[in-house]
Amino acid sequence: MRNPSTRWLWVLSLLVVAVAVPFIVSGYHVFQFTMVLNYAIAVFAANILSGYNGQIALGNGAFYALGAYTVAILLEHTGIPYWATIPFAAAICFIAGFLFGLPALRLEGPYLALATFALAVATPQLLKFHGIESWTHGVQGILVSKPDAPDFLPLDADQFLYFFCLAITVLMFALGSNLLRGRTGRAIVAIRDNPIAAASMGIDTSLYKSMTFGVSALFTGVAGALGALTTQFVSPDSFTLFLSISFIVGVVIGGVATVYGAFFGALFIQFVPNYADQISKAAPWAIYGTLLILGVYVMPGGVIGLLRLLARLAARSRPRGSGHAD
């Protein structure tokens, strides 16, 4: 799928399928696929930071919560429309991520993972802090109104929200893909591969690592903002450590350092726990763990890695043309 024409064919095919989804599935499944879009942005964000830049972080759930609470608080205390809250969530999360990335520059590998792990663990407790309870409502959480479809669109509220999230998802993936393909993306990857060589080539590794932290937080905040609109409720217990781990699981399942693998990772995050619960009510997480181990064993390069392998095998198996016209 490295051929540009083949890549665009895949993208257009996915868009056609995505547009058709809300018209062929039930309302609850529309909600589930809307969450898949939101999770895909968050998984892509985790991949930018960990897959492309090599910073192993376990705190993306904190920025997901920050984006969600930004939307909820703005909608409750201001009169701005729902769509205008998304840029606020993106900006706040970028600043928070960039600032958190500055002290994290001194940490690498397991030390950085531990620091971001602490951030993910502390976030639910911070959201319950009585000093900000007037804004977060503590353990009670905040109800978020679902946006209604405009009168000129023949869509119900669930379908409209799905298409709104789809439009934002396409925009975020387009921005992220362009970023990674450009000069900035090459610098980000160079720091992952060999930071000493990257610094010797004139790359400001400290700036780029902090910026990557900020960009990843921005994407995650947008995902959290859309997640708040989709679930119509935010509370501290919705943003546990498991959410951050799920994003890393999505990166591994979809494919490390891949763009479109985020969609496969998001599908895994959204549907596999539900299917595991249906298979066994007594031990759903044992089933989940088994499926995760099986997925990693069968697809060490993720779903995208498997698709690339199948594409290469298919290309090798094609008979070569004789070179003579019939």
Image (tube, rainbow, N blue to C red):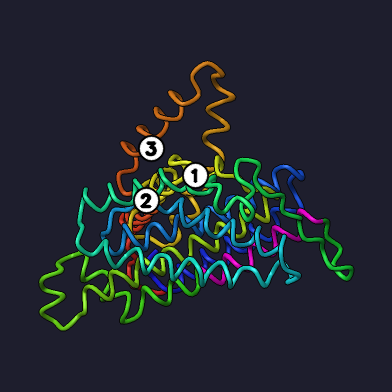
**Secondary structure found at label 2:** helix
Mark 2 to mark 3 CA distance (whole Å): 16 Å
Residue highlighted by disc 3: 295
Residue matched to label 1: 124
Whether residues under marks 2 and 1 lie with C-beta atoms below 8 angstroms apart, the answer is no
Q: Earlier in the sequence, mark 2 or mark 1?
A: 1
- Report the quarter where the C terminus lies: bottom left
- Which sits earlier in the primary sequence, circle 2 or circle 3? 3
Q: Please give the range of residues in magenta.
A: 157-172
Majority secondary structure of magenta residues = helix
Residue type of the residue flagged with mark 1: Pro
Residue at left offset 35%, top offset 63%: 100
Comparing 194 with 307, the one in front is 194
The quadrant holding residue 185 is bottom left
Residue at the image point whose x is 56% and y is 39% from the top: 271
In the orientation shown, which residue stands out farthest toward the front? Answer: 131
Q: Indicate which disc residue 310 carries.
A: 2
Residue 155 x %, y %: 83, 60
Q: CA distance from mark 2 to mark 1?
A: 43 Å
Residue 140 falls left or right of residue 148: left
Q: Nearer the viewer, mark 2 or mark 1?
A: 1
Residue 52: where, in percent of width, then height? 30, 63
